[in-house]
Image (cartoon, helix red, strand yellow):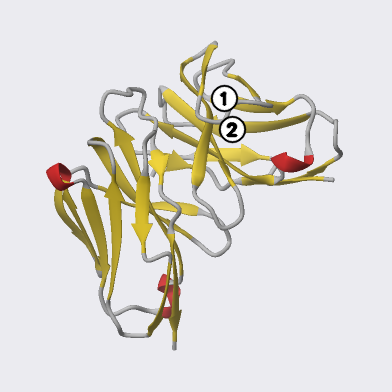
């Protein structure tokens, strides 16, 4: 089973503050993704990357930035956190199409 | 845009009953996965099944690609099956394995 780890697992942030969510995978996967899940809903793609030092916008990129400094690491950055960004964030990776998810990071913006 | 519809939205079973979860999608899918989300939030891949039928334990997934549908059958349900089941497709021609998720089926199995 592919190993994808996220940190922090839970965070409380203030409105307007900066938040960085980190993701690390140890399986040499090329593709990495950040998804957002709102309570009672499915997952929506925020940003993804298929190679280090390059990121692409997903379906809901507004208010988020991403960084892929190495093949193993992929970060999601909220420069100015807002109440509407309260959600659970999942990182995932793949190399051949089957997605492997991290445990999720619960973000609460107050 | 791409759309994945799952039904039913929620389901309550008595332990031992069977369940059939449906996933219909509006675009041809290159790939399809079924996921189980634990009540605590962890997502687990159940099947990577772009076409045909696959089995694991009490679970069976059947995908009919040209009819744009997939189903997940749970036999002899157990209380530990409770949680949310998601279908996700990788629509053809979008590239980069950009999966689109359905809203999920919330299953509760009672003893």
Which chain letter goes with mark 1? A
Q: Are marks 1 and 2 in contact (CB under 8 Å)?
A: yes
Determine whether B108 is above or below A40 in the image: below
Q: Quadrant of residue B62?
A: bottom left
Q: Residue furthest bottom?
A: B111
Determine whether A4 is above or below B23 in the image: above
Q: Residue furthest top?
A: A53
Q: Quadrant of residue A74?
A: top right
Question: x%, y% of residue B1?
Answer: 39, 33
Which chain letter goes with mark 2? A
Question: x%, y% of residue B2?
Answer: 36, 36
- Residue at image location 62% in from the left, 26% down from the top: A75
Question: x%, y% of residue A76?
Answer: 64, 28
Pointer 1 residue: A73
- Residue at image location 58% in from the left, 61% down from the top: B40
- Measured in 3D between alpha carbons, the distance from the residue under mark 1 to the one under mark 2, in whole angstroms, is 6 Å
Question: x%, y% of residue A45?
Answer: 50, 34
Q: Is residue B24 left or right of residue A45?
A: left
- Residue at image location 26% in from the left, 29% down from the top: B92
Determine whether A83 is above or below A46 in the image: below
Q: Does residue B76 show up?
A: yes
Q: Does residue A2 show up?
A: no
State which tag comes first along the sequence, 1 or 2. Answer: 2
Disc marking residue A23: 2
For the C terminus of chain A, the image quarter is: top right
For the N terminus of chain A, the image quarter is: top left
């Amino acid at each position: 089973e592919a190993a994808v780890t996220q940190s922090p697992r839970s965070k409380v942030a203030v409105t307007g503050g900066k938040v960085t969510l980190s993701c690390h995978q140890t399986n040499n996967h090329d593709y990495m993704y950040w998804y957002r899940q709102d309570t009672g809903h499915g997952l929506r793609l925020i940003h993804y990357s298929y190679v280090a030092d390059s990121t692409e916008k997903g379906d809901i990129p507004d208010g988020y930035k991403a960084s892929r400094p190495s093949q193993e690491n992929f970060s999601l950055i909220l420069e100015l956190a807002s109440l509407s960004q309260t959600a659970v964030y999942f990182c995932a990776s793949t190399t051949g199409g089957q997605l492997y998810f991290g445990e999720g990071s619960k973000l609460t913006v107050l | 845009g791409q759309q994945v519809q799952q039904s039913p939205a929620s389901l309550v079973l008595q332990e031992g009953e069977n369940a059939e979860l449906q996933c219909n999608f509006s675009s041809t899918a290159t790939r399809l996965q079924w996921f189980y989300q634990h009540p605590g939030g962890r997502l687990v891949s159940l099947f990577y099944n772009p076409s045909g039928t696959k089995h694991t334990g009490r679970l069976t997934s059947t995908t009919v690609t040209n009819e744009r549908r997939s189903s997940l059958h749970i036999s002899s349900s157990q209380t530990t099956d409770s949680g949310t089941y998601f279908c996700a497709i990788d629509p053809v021609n979008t590239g980069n394995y950009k999966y689109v998720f359905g809203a999920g089926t919330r299953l509760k199995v009672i003893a």
